[in-house]
Image (cartoon, rainbow, N blue to C red):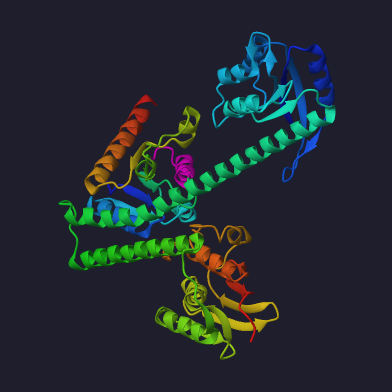
Amino acid sequence: METLRILIVDDEPGLRMGATRALRDFKVSVANVADEVGFAIDEAESVEAAMEKLAAARPQIMLLDHRLPGMSGTDFLEKLDLGSENDLLVIMITAYASLETAVAAAKRGAYDFLAKPFTPDELRGMVRKAAGRIMLQRQARKLAEEKRRVRFEFIRVLAHELKSPLGAIEGYLNICVSPDIKVTEAKLREMVDRSRERLVGMRQLINDLLDLTRIESGEKKRELAAVDLAAVAREAVENVLPQAGARGISVNLECPAPLEIRADRGELAIIVNNLVSNAVKYNRDGGRVDARIRRLPAGVEIAVSDTGVGMSPEETGRLFKEFSRIRNARTAGIPGSGLGLSILKKLVELYGGEVTVKSAPNEGSIFTALLRDVGHP
Amino acid sequence: MGKAKILVVDDDPDVVEQLKLVLDSAGYEVAAAGGMAEAEELLLSFHPDAAVIDLMMEHQDSGFVLCHEIKRLYPGTPVLLLTAVKAATGISFEPASEEQAAWVRVDRIMDKPVRPEQLTKEVEKLLAGAGQAGGQAAKSH
């Protein structure tokens, strides 16, 4: 249970006692907050006593009498100087709810008013409202903090991923100009080729990053029209044939043709290309890739299987996180931005679908994308 | 005396290639690994006189773990740890506490990128230091 501290500041002992009694065993449940909220009550009979208690243990809620000996509640509020970021909700208790007092107190940061005389239920209603606000504020703060953390982590990893190719290229350049190191013509050529490959990878990463940002911000214009998925898949297969052929990997496509769906052709191409090129990239030499596309009652399913490096259950678990490229001996030397699957997942989600994966280390993986909202003929 | 043997470990194949090139032309015998598992396997048959390893490989602290492992197998082998932490965060990296430093027992931490001359100079220094320490140990026996 969450406990909020309430400080009752009033010079009338009867009011303090009554309010304490009304709130002592009071519990509130707040929407979207799992825990019940209870209250710890403290009392102060003067401004001085209140200041001491505020300094000792800051309450979350203060019931403040407008008429205190020596200083009005409004002046007391001013003295407290509650900023906009304040974590103390002040409920003013007034003998007569005049508009003037209300405005003056609100200006100084009071949360609400309670006009004397009030019933225990009125008091509890007010406290319930204040508690709800405090709990929701806390939750919002926690969410914002979490968002900030995720963003920081993203930038940290992004910086690392961008720096690696720069470091590699800089390393080769340093070797080229080092007077101590003699390199052959062939070695020099090799170093230049490697540097260019790293630049290509870096450009790909930046492009993927922009794609991802566009999808996430909803900035990317979508043009939904009738698209033949079979044709898109054939193109995707043709795109990977050079790399697949070089490594003796066969790529097979099974798809009823034509397979018309309502989608954005560009998005569809990214989805299928991503699946098929991953299946080639993470395959073994001489392996095979099977892309099967079919219409199901739930939508259109694109399943691509490979006979490649595969993954352990632990690895598949973190697969769709940004930059979570699985780094191990089996994937060493395979280029990739680490954003491909994040992009794939976000795009498939635009079609109300999901991507699932089944995999076993050194046996291969099957990635399945189910697109739900693609219309029916 | 034969060539001094250096172990090089980094998960970036280009960085491995460069470290090999630089240390090769400085006259060392170099064995390289692309990750933790490979390095651990290699260490069973290869006793390095010094090791140059990357901090961030499979995990953010892989280099520390590997360093610990090297020191366990070959306590006399000095380890040079390469990090990219400073360039990424502006904070230079040091093991957080005395206890951690004692556990890691890394001999030198350098920020990437390291220029070829710097690298060979540091490796030379580490080898000289290790030789001296070994000599002293031998004398005191």
Could you say which quadrant of the image residue A346 lies in?
Answer: bottom right
Relative to B1, say whether A168 is above or below. Answer: below
> Number of marks in the image?
0
Decide if residue A158 is in sight here.
Answer: yes
Looking at the image, residue B86 sits to the left or right of residue A366; the answer is left
**Residue B8's spot in the image, x, y percent?**
36, 51
> Along the line of sight, which residue is nearer the eye, A54 or B26?
A54
Which residue is found at the position 71% from the left and 38% from the top?
A132
Residue at the far left: name it: A179
Report the magenta residues as a range. B61-77
Could you say which quadrant of the image residue A61 lies in?
Answer: top right
Which residue is found at the position 44% from the left and 45% from the top?
B63
Could you say which quadrant of the image residue A93 lies in?
Answer: top right
In the image, residue B67 lies in the stretch drawn in magenta: yes
Residue at the far bottom: name it: A257
**Residue A117's spot in the image, x, y percent?**
80, 23
SS assignment for the magenta stretch, majority: helix
Decide if residue B48 is in sight here.
Answer: no
Picture quarter with the C terminus of chain A: bottom right
Looking at the image, residue A54 sits to the left or right of residue A250; the answer is right
**Residue B132's spot in the image, x, y percent?**
31, 32
Picture quarter with the N terminus of chain A: top right
